Amino acid sequence: MTKISNNVQSLSSFAWSIADILRGDFKQSEYGKVILPFVVLRRLDCILEKSKDAVLKAAETLPKGVDDATRDMILFAAAGEDIKVYNLSRLTFASIKGQEPSQVHANLMDYITNFSGNIRDIFLDKFLFTDQLKRLNDGGILWQVFDRFAQIDLHPGRVSNIEMGYLFEDLIRRFSEISNETAGEHFTPREVIRLIVELLIANDDTKLTGKGIIRQVYDPACGTGGMLALTEEALKDFNPAIRVELFGQELNGESYGICKSDMLVTGHDPEQIAFGNTLINDAHKGKSFHYMLSNPPYGVDWKKYQDPIRDEAETLGFDGRFGAGLPRISDGQLLFLQHMIAKMRDDETGSRIGIVMNGSPLFTGGAGSGESEIRRWMLENDWVEAIVALPTDLFYNTGIQTYVWLLTNRKPKARRAKVQLIDASSERFWKSIRKSLGSKRREIPDEARKEIVRIYAEMLNGDGQYGEFSKIFDTTDFSYREIRVERPLRLNFQATAKRIERLKAEKALSKLDASEQAAILDGLFAHLPKTPFTNRDAFDKALTKALKGAKLKIAASVRKAILSALSERDEEADICTDKDGNAEPDTELRDHELVPLKEDWREYVAREVTPFVPDAWVDESHRDPRDGDVGRVGYEINFNRYFYRYVPPRPLEEIDAELKALEAQIARLLKEVAA
């Protein structure tokens, strides 16, 4: 690993040094638009070097009128059976370097436009590389940039595919930092990916052993393809004979270009990497996969493309991807997770999912909300196997707390109706890195990763040395019933000058003309008793008598306004009742209790509510639309509740000593200033 890191660091530093040439002609945020495509171009040039003559000869012998598919098949074969790319230009980096610098722009254009269609589109449509070449040429620096890249040796014998992945990641990280990209948008640290992959295959030994095994891996937000590449690496390390097929989709053009280029140069079918928004245009519709991994964007809203998502949820329901519910518009993470669940295989093998998300999907949203309903759907279907809390400061562009969710539709018997929570956020599972990389200040060492995987694989449950790090719960432990607790409305009534003045602001009264308002106010003040009433019915009768005495007839809305303005809440007053004699609820005293779903809500109320507020009752009309019982069912997973660690306050003596030391230091500084 050290050798790879040193090699990548050297290559990355060399490529990054080319930014010095760009300075002044390009903004810092635009450096990646030049350097990343040039890295891909140079890599392809090195790979195609040995097959160049064979491809050109094959092209000369192609029959006239050959269709595109046949032409590609013949030329791909000439380029080599492990790669699906060719270039029909007679130029190479070496031959371009031997020609006049003034011809470099025309030569590079010839070189790029003669790639096979699958790679030409990446440079022209996704990288928009011809625009950058023109800017470099107009600025008089194209030859300098090209010459520097021609010096980099990216031949496969010198730089492996894995090292190329590291190089892409390091360069993208640097460009992402100076471009102020959204946190975690482009890539996931390698040690986090390795942890997810090892967790996914931890107990799949028997399923992955033998010959003729095929596994399809999918990432709906694949970025530059890091998760796909490392999953393949892990699967092949376990079983060299396994066949791994990689699928993905990516919205960012440059990341898509890099990922598809990587698939090309490593012998995968590049057409299985799609471009576009996964949530509104599923490029792999109807497909299912063995393993699915993803690190979707955190806290990114989906407002601008909400219409097709809402349409799918409403028209297709559970026959589509979003039948369980829609999260709030400000965060689409749970949309990606529902999308992945929709692609689980319905066979004996089933599927396994590993997804990195922030804390929001764990607990955001109360009972009946979109988020809660999605959690309910997943837990009641028993798909959630484990959730691992990761250390903070792991990612390059964000230091926030993240969690790995593990889901499967083929749980082993021991895990059925169970969820394992693992707190891997403590110092036991991370170490500080020597030099910060953006927001990344920590990493998960190999030993810690293996320990986390063992805790998961062995289902360690609050025992021994791992008691504070791993706990296993029933799926229903995360559920609750939100019941509405009402208390009776108690009001007193009095026709004081202050309350009558308050009546003037009532909307029903303000709609009347001035003379009508004055007649009502004067009549009430003159005919209503000045003594307080603690019973609404008694006051209502007094009001009727006063209005009759003042010879006033008023609308029901005005009468309601009078009762409202002349009343105040009073705990000593009688309970207000409706026409049937039932107590009316006081909306200001309304409360909600979260009752564990395993417990009968009546027993809970008798124990936790009635002894403290004897006049309270439960509104039994407030029911769950799915199970029909009282209250709304909700689900949340609060890690802090289960892994809370008490930290005692510092002793007063210690704080006092520190304050005295600071006072003495301030006194010395003031003395020095005065001197």
Image (cartoon, rainbow, N blue to C red):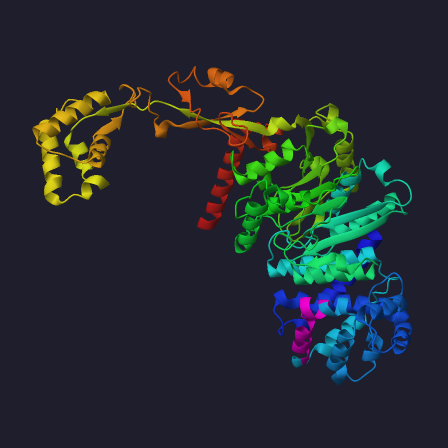
Q: Position of residue 489 (x, y in %)?
A: 31, 24
- Residue 46 appears in which quarter of the rendering? bottom right
- Viewer-proximal residue among 291 and 647: 291
Looking at the image, residue 115 sits to the left or right of residue 297; the answer is right
Residue at (64% x, 36% y) in the render:
378
> Do we see residue 645 in this rendering?
no
Q: Position of residue 538 (x, y in %)?
A: 20, 20
Residue at (19% x, 32% y) in the render:
499
Q: Position of residue 325 (x, y in %)?
A: 56, 41
Q: Position of residue 370 (x, y in %)?
A: 54, 40
Predominant SS of the magenta segment: helix
Looking at the image, is 44 positioned above or below residue 535?
below
Residue at (10% x, 28% y) in the render:
548
Tell whether position 661 is magenta.
Answer: no
Looking at the image, is 232 positioned above or below residue 533?
below
Looking at the image, is 11 positioned above or below residue 350?
below
Looking at the image, is 134 positioned above or below residue 365?
below
Q: Which residues are magenta?
A: 122-137
